Image (cartoon, rainbow, N blue to C red):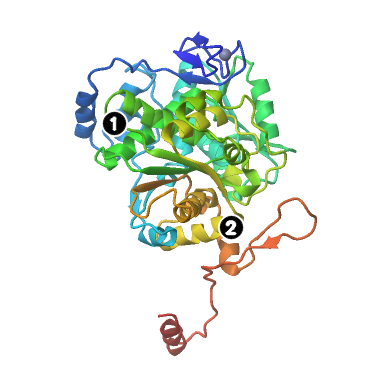
Amino acid sequence: MQRCINSACGATYGLRERIYVCPRCGETLEIDCGLTGRTDARALRDEWASRPTLRTHSGDPRETSGVWRYLELLPFEPDAPYVTLFEGHTPLFDAPRSAEYCGLGALRLKHQGYNPTGSFKDTGMAAAMTQAVISGAHTAVCASTGNTAASLAAYAAHAGLQAAILLPRGQVSSSKLAQSLDYGALVLEIDGNFDACMRLVQEIGDDPSIYVANSINPFRIEGQKTVAFEIMEQCNWRVPDHLVVPGGNMGNSTALGKGFQELVDLGLIDHLPKLNVMQAEGAAPLARLFTNLHLKNAADIQRIPEKLEPVANPQTLATAIKIGAPLSWKKSLRAVLRSGGRIISVSEQEIADAKATIGRDSIGCEPDSATTVAGIKKLVAAGHIGHDHEVIAVLTGHALKDPDYMIRYHEGTLSFSSGAKHGSGQPLAGAFRNSPRRVEATKAAILSSLERQR
Ligand SMILES: [Zn+2]
């Protein structure tokens, strides 16, 4: 069933009712998969272990998809019309240079940019588009900073649905726009920011032909929670001390929090990893709220504020998290507090240098993902993460999602305007700058150039 997260309301609704927020009180919904009382969890774990993890062509979505691999813990019937593009099964990398940069003995990076459209959105979209097909909708709609658009466009096309995408004009990386166009989606550019697009989508969601697949969509959270299961399988069920994720609309941290909590409820792990969320300074409404919470004990979690003060004009070069009024903030905050983690913000310079460090680890990511390494460095320096702690950071997008950012960083032309003043932005120094060099077209010149760089 679907349940309102407002404990004072507590309304419940059928799984197949096409609602996106609680019709009674307007609060967001959460799906209860009826896992409590399940006593076969250990058998399930063995069952998953017996399923191939390669992207095989067996035709069985439990084998080809890293989402449907865990269908026993998802709100779908065994004969559902599963939509899949071989999502999930993403790598967990050792990142020694990033670890050293952060002051850690070791650091692992779970790279959700290895999904079919290059971002973490795909796991949730597999579930949401399956639900859209079941609901009989003709058109799937979302507002997006780019990654959701690309993912919705691809999954809707695969499911045989029309895709319509509302984007803030001029504020989306060209790579992401290109993807949406290529997958055949109807792209509607709006004069306004992401938060304005989101409000419009909520308004048109009343139409019965339309299925809204925004991050508020509880089925997307269900697909995305499987990342927690996949991480635990990859860790051989040993719980890391800390999990670190970027925070924009907060769907990712909400989903991971739910996934880990379900594993605890099922008895597959005995405690939660500390869930830490990183925001960019210019788009950090939840980090600001967290700083002012002053929670003394776990019981205070019930007293989190009713309202989040939004950032009216969010600013960051990490466009994927340029969100001033995150919709899933309450579910995310609850998950962070329950786990004993933190929500902090990092500067544009810290993001840029952390991103280059992840690149030097041979991994690469889009700028928002680098808030994780930047934030871990700060939490280690502050003593919140120990040097010997086991830490896993979730990278949300592929490096090629935003190539302009990388070129400008390495050329030394990256700059950031906080929006407070007019004129050119503040330059961001490329501490790990690596710009191309012009070399004479001779063997001697090339060898001498190599020699100088050794
Ligand atoms: Zn309600």
Q: Residue furthest right?
A: 422
Marks 1 and 2, how far apart at CA: 41 Å
Q: Is residue 171 left or right of residue 117?
A: right
Quadrant containing the C terminus is: bottom left
Instruction: Name the mark on residue 270.
Output: 1
Q: In the displayed structure, would residue 95 be above or below residue 344?
A: below
Q: Quadrant of ligand 1?
A: top right
Crowd band around label 1 with a 10 angstrom C-alpha radius: few (<14), some (14–19), many (20+):
some
Q: Which amino acid does label 2 sit on?
A: Tyr
Question: Which-is-in-front pick, marks 1 and 2?
Answer: 1
Tell me the quarter of the picture where residue 261 sits: top left
What residue appears at the point 38 percent right and 51 percent down from the top-left corner? 386
Residue 446 rendering spot, x and y as whole percentages = 45, 84
Q: Residue at x 50, y 33 (%)?
A: 296
Q: Where is residue 448 in the image (x, y as percent from the top left)?
A: 44, 87
| Residue 240: percent from left, percent from top | 33, 43
Is disc 1 in contact with disc 2, using a CB cutoff of under 8 Å?
Answer: no
The N terminus: image quadrant: top left
Residue at the image point whose x is 66% and y is 37% from the top: 194
Residue 205 in the image: state x and y as whole percent. 63, 20
Q: Name the residue under label 2.
A: 405
